[in-house]
Image: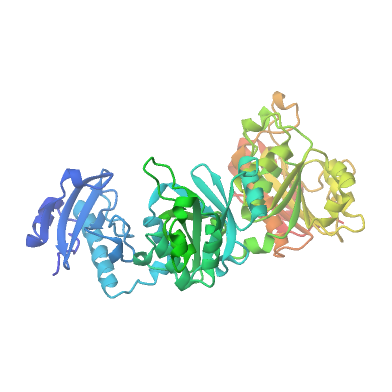
Amino acid sequence: MSLPLEAAPSDAPEELDPDAWFGGLGDDFLGRVPAALLRAGMVDGWRLRWGGRELEVQVDEDFPFAAARVYLVGYERGQAQPHIERNGKLCLGSNGVPGNRVRTIQTALAEAFQLLADNDTREHDDDFREDFGLYWLNWADRSDLRVEILPGPEGARKSILGRAALAGKRVLVFPGKNDATRICTNLTGSASKWLKETPVISIDPLPAPDRYPETADELWALVEARSQSGTDLLKRLMANAPKEAFVVLAGKAPSGREHYAATYLRRPLDHSGKPLKRKTMRRGTEKSEDSTRSLFGRFKLQRIATQRLDSSASRLPDGVQRQVAAARIIVVGCGALGSGVAKMLAKTGVEHLRLIDPELMGWENIRRHELGGGAVGHGKAMALAHSIRSDLPMISFVEGYAMTFAAFARQHPGLLKQADLVVSCTGNWTADASVEFALAQPGHKASAIYGWMEAHALASHAVLIGNTGPRLADGFDENGAFRLPVVAGGKAPPPECGGATTTFGAIELSHAQALVARLAMDAMREHETAPAWHTRIADTDAFEEAEAAVTSGWAAARGQPGNTGGLFIAEWPFP
């Protein structure tokens, strides 16, 4: 059968009405979808026959500025097809033709017919394993509970006995107690008191939806057939016939992508709605050929939506996290600049951070700082460390120190010697000098990055200095004045600032944060070597608004910046 799917001419004087277009299909048009049978969020729909199937086209209130949805009527898991959701909705990528109802419907149907034709030839069958996690999510039995798993060092290749922690309607599964303690503490402030042994069983191959287990007995059979010794973990789980338990299946797609799928097991309920007693569960199983399997088979099973706790790593540039995870970094100064740099480094994959700042958070800071009003009155370093741990609970180590860097160097000399990189964002010449002095002592291997901003954040600098060669002090006079500033003039600081700072906002600050964090990442990945000097200069409009100009010394030495400002890179050129 062929349907008239060619789009109507875009210059047609009047758009064809969808009812009229569907009516033109003759016997293949099966009528409008009754209002009571419309899917959630849909406001109109039509039925048609194609290739021996019954389809529905449904639209929401945004139509024709939203795509039309196509559903396969009577869709069941036993006849599961790739790229079709549990409710029969076909996963289509087209957005239609905004503003044109018929052409939007035609576009959706053309793509739907192609998908169904491809499925008839089994062209997409590998998708069941490639996107196994999404299909499992589609066919999950419960939406009120989800399992979030942190894979072990060997990932889906090896079966392990993990530990599960209950956190409300979330069940967090970890490869061991140490990970459970660290991450639960980062998330909630305390270790979980509820840890259950939870098998994470490697299976190969991953099953298609029609082979997903419906019962505990089917789960046992799947594990027995597709894993190596996975049933040993199930036997251990049954040793005490728990009231409830979780079993996680793990496997790899053809591309090597790892997937995890959780099941929830519970004892059946008695006539009063309570779980059966252990004695009742075991009754009669001892007479069976495999008493443990018989006991396991009596549990009720539900498939549970499953996510990876570490899935954010997949959004990072390829290989970046692996390169920087082992680096030990100290951030000195957790103010407006340093707080943003620390958070950027943590989000980019740095796993080991020590944060140093003696000051408390004040209300005057909250519009330019990564911390908000909730941290006012608390130490910046400690509060920032807590914020990072809470936002990124998988991070290995973040600790704050409410002290100056000089005090840290005296009190923790061993920690300083372990550091690979020190990032100083104090904007204070004396503090930066203390960093340089400490790192020049024998036994220290760390390079240092010094970041600071000039007036109104019109220029920001990041300087990478190694533990040999040029020093930061070369670029400053004995009073701490920079020898080659960019900014001249500018509006006076407001009286409320006491002359200690100039006005700038979070947008201007973000350029400086990114400049320093990027140089730190480049240094760790050996994309930049010391000595290196990176400068970011604002555009002409920003200079004019601040009533400032570029210094003649900068223009003579480095050239006059263009109207859009930009990035200037050089070695640290001072004698």
Residue at image location 72% in from the left, 50% down from the top: 353
Query: In the rendered view of the protein, which quadrant contains the C terminus?
Result: bottom right
Is residue 560 at least partly visible in the picture? no
Query: In the rendered view of the protein, which quadrant contains the N terminus?
Result: bottom left
> Does residue 257 lie above or below 464 as drawn?
below
Is residue 342 at least partly visible in the picture? yes
Q: Return the x and y of residue 98 as percentages of the image width and height.
A: 27, 51
Residue at image location 8% in from the left, 58% down from the top: 24
As drawn, the residue found furthest toward the left would be: 26
Q: Quadrant of residue 429?
A: top right
Colouring scheme applied when the structure was drawn:
rainbow
Residue at image location 79% in from the left, 36% down from the top: 358
Q: Return the x and y of residue 225 as percentages of the image width and height.
A: 45, 73
From the viewer's perspective, is 164 left or right of 24?
A: right
Q: Quadrant of residue 162?
A: bottom right
Taking depth in this image into account, of 547 and 419 the one nearest to the observer is 419
